[in-house]
């Protein structure tokens, strides 16, 4: 019974984390048709920035609760600055080119940004445990859990609701849907697609950075820790259906729960199972479990 | 005509390398071994690239080739270079044939993603399985040749050069054949190919298996040259990314390009790592971006220009 | 004309969901015929060609070629049995030169067994390639990249490539669409001249009634997925349903007696 609760909580927590990290990736792909490897850089930069400032402010004697503000501000700042620069500086020049080549270009940029981290923040790990320590722990069904970890679930739910609301209940969402459905038609109808792209990319980047910033207090932030994240979020996004937000949710839950089961019951298959599911989905349902609607053009 | 100079050029290069290799210092010989061994994989990716396909998961075959060598060594004590190489190619050929039945129906980003998934499945198995060396991998004993167990790395170096030459010559012949023409033809227009009575799926399958075997050979030779195998530098997605990167860097223009591009990459990485240990990825990534934006034909296009200016 | 039909289409039917794209199509084609397929946009002409050439699977019905059932076979196998086609939008290898396009087509057609591994530049192929370029009068574009060709030349290349497999039947989807009015007869003359030399049976989709009158021996008219008329051109073009649903009333009737071109 206790194992079961642990698995469920672990699974939900990990799913939430995966969702926050990968929803930005799927939004960017859905709108711009770009599979963005630098998403890992947003994650890493978000984590480093948050960890750095949490440490700094804590030393200056600010209350630990301020850490949550730092996390949010870091995510927005990192996402906006990096997202804007990358969209304007690089992707802008590539939209006409082959989508696989764009993936490679973002891979090149990812490598550059990885080392830029080292130049800015140094090679030593950062520990920003303050927000996590602040929230202490609770007992659920006889199991002790960190409250901070549980808040991940709430944050993910909030992100999901905001995404849903933004896409379905705002004008901006309608513009976005139009661009996703048919870019040329939207342009012809007078939608400023250029601006839609910039804003979309920044939103994706902020979400990526938020994933990193929020997870930072629970881990030691070390060089290269975005490497595994990007490929996991590729798996999530592919399983759910590239470009689909509900898909990212389903993908996160599938991967998160499977991994939690694996970790507790059969640790050898922890990584294997994620990519096996990804492969199986691609083989039998290449558009993903939640394929976004696509117009057929001949 | 300049187009017939590839094979004589490769042959001269082979002779120079084989003879010169006897005199060069060990560090340079190592660099050339790693570079030329990897070039075999690039040769395979080049054929796929010309067909319009980019695999983000060829580390699967690189890893299978390398681990085949390591497992032969550890479990059966087989050290013969030819047996190791042969087994690695058989294994990767077999796996490539099987996966090819699925992958030949995929294009673009889906081809890239499914390749990635398959390679990460292997990675996931390797890092979590103690019997397969887990995250540490294995060390590989130095190769023997038939029954000889020579000192030093020179014999392996010669083997890599000769095998590289052979592969380049074969691929060159292939590219000039009808099957080879079915690279650009498939990339340009699959419908036309089908309506000429040829199966696009079959054409892609053949190329995929070819690239798998070549990448397997690359992995096997690298394992022997390095004396060890490990999942992170050989099977993880970054390893696949590196292979694709070197392919772009080399350019699709010639079967000689992978050898030049791969060697330059090896030197670039080593020197960048020595000079600026915390910025070598930046240099590598920057180079990739520069090539994509300013040199779509890769390093080879610079050579081609120089060769033309020669005449 | 010979006895058994070379192509038999029996009760062919195609539905996309609730839309009926082809209904009860029955056509027998004899060797040597030149058939013009006419009809308004969406009448089912291309659907018909797509079904015969394996691009679409029929919902029901049978297609027989030289007595063999080829219903639902993929394009590759249909081509191998001796049916070829061109496309409304020319399907050529855009990054290759005209010469390489044709050489590639010849080589692929000639790739049974080990031939696939022989060098593509071999005397028998290159000679045939040069001959074909001359026959279709596109040899002056020898080294032009296919993506840069004028529309008419691209059409000729497309048809030349369709013909390298030496088909017994060729289906052309609007061979003159996108070609200027001055050029169209010239292009049709080249095509028909080349096809006649190969004694191939031709079915072509055409919107231009001048072309239909001049080149075909039989007209098949489509309307809403059905064949509404299957007659020689001099009768078909004055058929009341054809005039109502396909050509439009304004097409001059008095030209009609000039049906003399039709059976050349």
Image (spheres, rainbow, N blue to C red):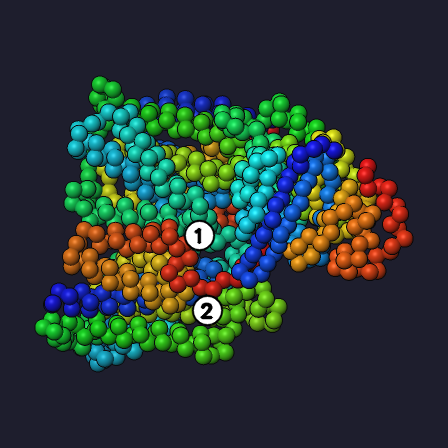
Image quarter where the N terminus of chain A lies is bottom left
Residue C264 place in picture, x, y as percent: 82, 37
Residue at 23 percent across and 68 percent down: it is: A13
Which quadrant of the figure has residue A40?
bottom left
Residue at 41 percent across and 77 percent down: it is: A165
**Label 1 CA crowd tier, 10 Å (few <14, some 14–19, many 20+):** many
Q: Considering the numbered disc 2 on the image, is that residue within a helix, a strand or a loop?
A: helix
Residue pointed to by mark 1: B109
Residue pointed to by mark 2: A200
**Label 2 CA crowd tier, 10 Å (few <14, some 14–19, many 20+):** many
> Closest to the observer: C226 or B233?
C226
> Closest to the observer: A114 or C11?
C11
Which quadrant of the figure has residue A136?
bottom left
Q: Considering the numbered disc 1 on the image, is that residue within a helix, a strand or a loop?
A: helix
Q: Which mark is residue B120?
A: none
Total labels: the figure holds 2
Foreground label between 1 and 2: 1
The relative height of residue A16 versus residue C98 in the rendered view (above or below) is below
The relative height of residue B277 versus residue A144 in the rendered view (above or below) is above
Residue at 21 percent across and 35 percent down: it is: B71
- Chain of the residue displaying label 1: B
| C252 lies left or right of B162 | right
Image quarter where the C terminus of chain A lies is bottom right
Residue B17 place in picture, x, y as percent: 39, 25
Residue A114 shows in the view = no
Residue B21 place in picture, x, y as percent: 34, 25
Residue A96 shows in the view = yes
């Amino acid at each position: 019974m206790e194992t079961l609760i642990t698995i469920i909580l672990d699974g939900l927590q990990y799913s939430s984390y995966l969702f926050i990290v990968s929803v930005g990736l799927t939004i960017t792909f859905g709108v711009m048709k770009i599979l963005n490897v630098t998403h890992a850089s947003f994650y890493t930069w978000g984590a480093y920035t948050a960890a750095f400032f949490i440490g700094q402010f804590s030393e200056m004697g600010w209350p630990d609760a301020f850490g949550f503000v730092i996390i949010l501000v870091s995510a927005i700042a990192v996402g906006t600055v990096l997202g804007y620069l990358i969209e304007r500086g690089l992707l802008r020049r590539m939209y006409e080119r082959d989508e696989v080549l764009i993936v490679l270009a973002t891979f090149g940029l990812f490598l550059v940004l990885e080392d830029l981290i080292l130049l800015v923040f140094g090679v030593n790990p950062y520990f920003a445990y303050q927000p996590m320590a602040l929230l202490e722990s609770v007992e659920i069904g006889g199991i002790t859990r960190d409250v901070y970890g549980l808040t991940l679930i709430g944050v993910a739910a909030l992100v999901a609701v905001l995404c849903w609301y933004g896409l379905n209940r705002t004008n901006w969402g309608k513009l976005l849907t139009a661009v996703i459905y048919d870019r040329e038609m939207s342009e012809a109808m007078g939608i400023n697609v250029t601006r839609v792209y910039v804003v979309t990319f920044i939103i994706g980047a902020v979400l990526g950075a938020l994933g990193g910033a929020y997870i930072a207090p629970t881990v030691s932030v070390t060089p290269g820790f975005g490497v595994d994240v990007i490929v996991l979020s590729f798996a999530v996004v592919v399983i759910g259906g590239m470009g689909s937000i509900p898909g990212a949710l389903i993908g996160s839950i599938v991967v998160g729960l499977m991994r939690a089961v694996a970790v507790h019951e059969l640790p050898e298959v922890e990584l294997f199972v994620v990519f096996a599911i990804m492969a199986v989905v691609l083989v039998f349902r290449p558009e993903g479990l939640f394929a976004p609607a696509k117009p057929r053009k001949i | 005509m300049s187009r017939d100079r590839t094979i004589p050029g490769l042959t001269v290069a082979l002779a120079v390398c084989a003879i010169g290799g006897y005199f060069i210092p060990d560090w340079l010989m190592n660099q050339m071994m790693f570079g030329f061994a990897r070039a075999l994989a690039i040769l395979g990716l080049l054929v796929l690239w010309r067909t319009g396909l980019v695999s983000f998961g060829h580390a699967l075959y690189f890893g299978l080739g390398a681990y085949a060598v390591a497992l032969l060594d550890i479990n059966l004590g087989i050290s013969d270079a030819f047996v190791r190489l042969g087994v690695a190619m058989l294994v990767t050929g077999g796996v490539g044939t099987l996966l090819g039945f699925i992958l030949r129906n995929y294009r673009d980003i889906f081809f890239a993603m499914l390749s990635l998934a398959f390679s990460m499945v292997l990675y996931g198995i390797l890092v979590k399985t103690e019997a397969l060396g887990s995250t540490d991998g294995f060390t590989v004993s130095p190769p023997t040749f038939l029954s000889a167990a020579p000192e030093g790395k020179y014999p392996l170096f010669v083997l890599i050069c000769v095998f590289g030459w052979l592969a380049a010559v074969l691929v060159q012949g292939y590219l000039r054949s009808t099957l080879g023409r079915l690279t650009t033809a498939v990339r340009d227009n699959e419908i036309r190919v089908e309506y000429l009575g040829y199966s696009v799926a079959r054409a892609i399958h053949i190329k995929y298996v070819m690239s798998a075997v070549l990448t397997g050979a690359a992995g096997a030779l690298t394992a022997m040259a390095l004396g060890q195998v490990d999942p992170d530098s050989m099977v993880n997605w970054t390893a696949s990314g590196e292979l694709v990167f070197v392919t772009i860097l080399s350019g699709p223009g010639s079967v000689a390009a992978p050898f030049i591009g791969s060697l330059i990459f090896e030197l670039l990485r080593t020197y960048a790592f020595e000079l600026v240990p915390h910025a070598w990825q930046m240099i590598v990534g920057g180079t990739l971006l520069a090539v994509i934006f300013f040199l779509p034909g890769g390093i080879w296009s610079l050579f081609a220009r120089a060769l033309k200016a020669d005449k | 004309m010979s006895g058994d039909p070379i192509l038999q289409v029996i009760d062919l039917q195609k539905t996309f969901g609730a839309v009926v794209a082809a209904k009860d199509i029955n056509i027998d084609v004899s060797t040597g015929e030149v058939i013009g397929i006419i009809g308004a946009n969406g009448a089912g002409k291309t659907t018909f060609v797509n079904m015969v050439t394996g691009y679409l699977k029929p919902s029901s019905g049978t297609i027989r070629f030289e007595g063999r059932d080829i219903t639902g076979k993929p394009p590759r196998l249909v081509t191998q049995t001796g049916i070829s086609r061109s496309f409304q939008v020319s399907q050529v290898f855009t990054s290759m030169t005209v010469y390489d396009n044709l050489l590639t087509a010849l080589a692929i057609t000639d790739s049974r067994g080990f031939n696939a591994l022989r060098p593509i530049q071999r005397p028998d192929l290159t000679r045939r390639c040069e001959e074909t370029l001359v026959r279709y009068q596109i040899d002056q574009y020898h080294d032009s990249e296919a993506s840069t060709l004028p529309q008419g030349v691209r059409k000729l290349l497309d048809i030349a490539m369709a013909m390298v497999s030496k088909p017994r039947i060729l289906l052309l989807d609007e061979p003159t669409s996108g070609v200027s009015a001055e050029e169209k007869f010239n292009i049709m003359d080249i095509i028909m001249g080349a096809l006649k030399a190969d004694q191939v049976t031709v079915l072509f989709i055409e919107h231009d009634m001048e072309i239909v009158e001049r080149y075909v021996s039989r007209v098949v008219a489509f309307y809403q997925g059905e064949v509404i008329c299957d007659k020689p051109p001099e009768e078909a073009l004055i058929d009341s349903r054809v005039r109502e649903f396909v050509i439009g009333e304004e097409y001059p009737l008095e030209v009609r007696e000039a049906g003399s071109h039709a059976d050349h």
